[in-house]
Image: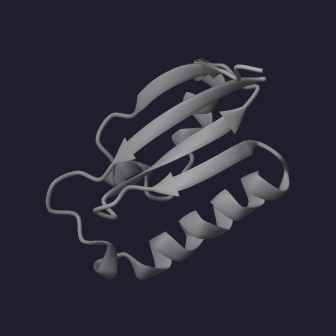
């Protein structure tokens, strides 16, 4: 199984409490991708200033295109991508 992990970090000064409607839409998009099997797993960062999302069987180009459609995308620093292989 190939996984592409994306590390997302909010830009300095972004306050999620001021982005209620955008955050709600973000959660809906992520829930949809999860139900479609696009997302393998997701973790919030400890400081709640970002997330790590693991995508199933998609290359970095496809994941980048998806990430750019997230409602919070304009509020993130440039994403970091890691290609991972499951060690069976």
**Residue at image location 71% in from the left, 45% down from the top:** 39
Residue ranking furthest to the left: 13
Residue 14 is left or right of residue 46, and the answer is left
**Residue at image location 78% in from the left, 21% down from the top:** 88
| Number of numbered labels in the structure image | 0
Quarter of the image with the N terminus in it:
top right
Residue 8 is left or right of residue 61, and the answer is left
Residue ranking furthest to the right: 36
Residue ranking furthest to the front: 88
As rendered, which of 82 and 33 lies closer to the eye?
82
**Residue at image location 47% in from the left, 71% down from the top:** 22
Q: Quadrant of residue 85?
A: top right
Relative to 26, residue 74 above or below = above
**Residue 16 % position (x, y):** 32, 72
As rendered, which of 39 and 20 lies closer to the eye?
39
As rendered, which of 69 and 83 lies closer to the eye?
83
Residue 39 is left or right of residue 19, and the answer is right
As rendered, which of 29 and 55 lies closer to the eye?
55
Relative to 80, residue 41 above or below = below
**Residue 86 % position (x, y):** 70, 23
**Residue 34 % position (x, y):** 75, 54
Q: Quadrant of residue 66?
A: top right
Residue 10 is left or right of residue 81, and the answer is left
**Residue 73 % position (x, y):** 43, 49
Relative to 74, residue 64 above or below = above
């Amino acid at each position: 199984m190939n996984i592409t992990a994306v590390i997302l970090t909010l830009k300095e000064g972004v306050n999620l409490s001021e982005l209620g409607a955008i955050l709600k839409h973000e959660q809906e998009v992520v829930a949809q991708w999860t139900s479609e099997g696009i997302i393998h797993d997701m973790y919030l960062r400890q400081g709640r200033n970002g997330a790590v999302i693991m995508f199933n069987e998609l290359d970095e180009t496809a994941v980048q295109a998806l990430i750019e459609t997230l409602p919070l995308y304009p509020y993130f620093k440039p994403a970091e991508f890691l290609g991972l292989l499951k060690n069976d």
